[in-house]
Image (cartoon, coloured by chain):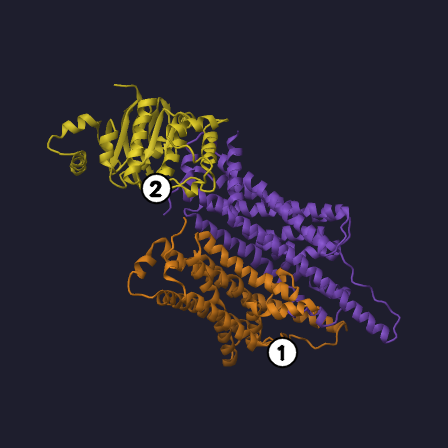
Chain colours: A orange, B yellow, C purple
Amino acid sequence: MPQVLLAVFVGMVTASSVIGWLTNQVVTSVYDRTFAAGLTTQPNPFSAVSPLYYAKNTVIYIILIGALLAIVLGVQSTIRDRKAHTFDLVLSRPVRPASYLGAKLAGLLCWVAGILALSALISWTSISAIVGSVLSPGDTARLLGFYALAWLFLLPFIILGMLTGVYSRRETTALLVPIVIWSVVTFVVPQLGTAAHPVSLLNPVPAIASQGGVFQLANLVLGPLSLTEHFKQASAFVLGDTATTGSPLLSLVVMVAFAGCMLVVLLTTQRDRMRSPLDE
Amino acid sequence: MNDTAIKTTELSHSYGPKAALKGLNLSVGEGEIFGLLGHNGAGKTTAVSLLTTLIPPTEGTATILGLDIHADADEVRRTIGYLPENVQFYGNLTLLENLRFFARLSGLDKPDARIREVLEFLDFTGHESERLSTFSKGMRQRVGIAQSILHNPKVLFLDEPTSGLDPQGVRNLREIILNLNRHFGMTIFMNTHLLAEVTQTCTSIGVLREGELVYQDSLAATLTAFPDEASLEDIYLHIEARPER
Amino acid sequence: MNSLLVIARRELTDLKRTRFYLILFGFLAVVMILSVIVASFDFRAKIGDYNLYLDTLRRSGSTETPPAPQLFPLQLLRGSIEYLELIGALFAIIIGYGTVAKEKQHGTLHLIFTRPVSRFTVAGGKVLAFAVAWAVVTAGVFVAMIAALLVIGNAPLQLIDFERLALTAIIAWLYLMLWSCVAMGLAARARRASTGLIVALVAWLVVVLIIPQIGDTMDPDNQVPGGLFKSLAVAKPDEKAVMANFAGFDDIRNGLEVSSITKHFERPAFALLGIKDQYNQQPVGDVWASMLPYTITLTLAFMGAVGFTALATTKRALLRRES
């Protein structure tokens, strides 16, 4: 069934450039009218917007659909082995658990890289079609950089799925626990740090932290755990969104740290744990 | 010959294009213990599913104590008991809660006295408030038998009742089946692979091959009809190997 | 006892004793309460900012006193309602799926259908169990939110506020029931219950997250951190005047949003609780009347979901062999 999620993901990536372009057209008109009515003297924040701006909704689709797809892929890859007892067979051979899980992860990462490469091609083609000219090498490199970031962002979710597939007693739990963790990372942690409303966090524009003392402290403590907000931050930088503030390097470091920690947890999984039977 | 408990006429069922049961004509007398034999995929479970009203026949008819399995389905359900293969019941509920649930679905409004009676008959008292998630396979099988006889059915269907049981469990179950038949005159219809059990339990047998009934007779007649075969296992394999009629 | 009630009672006992479900409900209550806490602190921070601004004005010799931020306690529930629409719907799916998946895995359906039960007994019993379970959970989380408002938000609630909360709880119940019924129907229809779960999760993703998200990101004001009009220093009345010229675009955007049933829960909930400014402090009757079309569509969708699950949860569908 990941095929359905995959179809939704590719469909939304295709649609996102059109949505981005349409929104940009309207926003520019809104600004022009506001300026013409003498209601503002501020410069148009969208006058020098990069064509890659049109792809910014893709950031959210990677957070929403990509992460869920990664979780489902991860869960299925390990739970299938437990259901069919193939873990027992493999581990009765001279194979270390770390090697086996690492190899499974490598396979999944290749698969995800393939999907993201396809998405990059779709984005590149649709944006080129919208702007009426082929994207410049610089913009192409930025787009590729964004999809590389997406790959890095999805890595911990694949591993999370694999781990719950190994540790859970039931298939439903294996699927639901990472989705709950994803919802905590996507909605709860950023909300605690910024006072943003959960639904507004689905906007590709990163949330601005509330300035109250409590929130400054909460943001300091929880900020590094807001993986999705860091992905938005780093993506905005790579896609050339000048309106976004914050340190892209810090965001990159957080994403690498998340991926690294999850990798360590996966590779230290015990043999006994992998062989534990499912309840259903 | 006793009155007929189960009678099927050209009973057939197909799963899509695949015919699982082809024109079954079978008759089981009241008070018999009938064993339906056959390889995996021969159509045994389909036959039981039809007779227990779980699936409708594609063609043909069947009656249980004169009641049509299609037209009088609810009456048939009140008349029969059923234990499917590998049923696990509700692990979060206690033994008593599980049995109350099935008793009430069978129409017993105040089932506790009857549950106690059945558990005593099965020598299974003392576990009433334990959750089924803690029960062994053998214990669950007793729960299965208990729920199937709570409403005093006249005909009992057992699908692979000994599947997964240890030798002691198999022996206990055999005793229960024989007691149900002896004490309550219950007609018992069971699917099984364990031919040794059939020899010790059944009064008549039938053999299904690829959805068709290729043999039916009493156990005693069967054992004498094949003097060259040393055991029921040999007889069964002989019947299975015979060319199609 | 009627067979339908027997099945409903067993489902409720099972739900009550499944630790996993209790953890889910607990998690939902915790995030909803946390959201009230965050909103309360945010309000306090705004009051702090206001006092600071007032001090600065006084020091500069100004006698002007700008209006203080006013606390409308029910507005603190915005995040909680959003959690209910996002995470509540997800948990409703899990519960709806679980009730069929467990029976399929444990083989108990074969036993139930060899008892004299009518065509809709199994589906009806399960839906009745959801109705009771969601009534209890909805009441529980709303009581928890009220307690959080009173204790943490230090918010004085009037009788009328309880009326608003009760009406919101009723539409929340309809919304959660809808998702449980859809998931149960899908799990029953699918040859493998887990396939039904993934289809339901995809539906959740599209209906609850993606469609409202598209509508949200197409909002011109959401294109700049903190809001476009705020960054351009444009006041609210002027913003409305400008946006009146883009009614066509806004209609499309709105049409897209209301194609998600989630918005038919969110909009009446936000209106009743006064989260949407235009409905704040308006008489309940007027708000209810304005929101009636959404409430009607939500009710129709709920009835459709119940109908779907009743028709999908048949003996034939449930006893189909897994492939």
Q: Is residue B156 above or below residue A104?
A: above
Q: Can residue B55 be seen by looking at this rendering?
A: no
Q: Can residue C101 be seen by looking at this rendering?
A: yes
Residue projecting furthest to the front: B126
The numbered disc on residue B16 is 2
Q: Give x and y (percent) for residue C133.
A: 57, 43
Q: Give x and y (percent) for residue A66.
A: 49, 63
Q: Give x and y (percent) for residue C161.
A: 74, 49
**Nearer to me, B49 or C303:** B49
Number of residues whose C-alpha sits closer than 10 Å to that of mark 2, classed few (under 14), some (14–19) or many (20 or more): few
Residue at image x 54%, y 40%?
C12
Amino acid carrying label 1: it is Ala
Q: Give x and y (percent) for residue B212.
A: 25, 34
Picture quadrant where residue A161 is located: bottom left
The numbered disc on residue A180 is none
Residue projecting furthest to the left: B228
For the C terminus of chain B, the image quarter is: top left
For the N terminus of chain B, the image quarter is: top left
* Residue occupied by mark 1: A48
**Nearer to me, A203 or A257:** A257
Q: Chain of mark 1?
A: A
Number of residues whose C-alpha sits closer than 10 Å to that of mark 1, classed few (under 14), some (14–19) or many (20 or more): few
Picture quadrant where residue A89 is located: bottom left
Amino acid carrying label 2: it is Gly
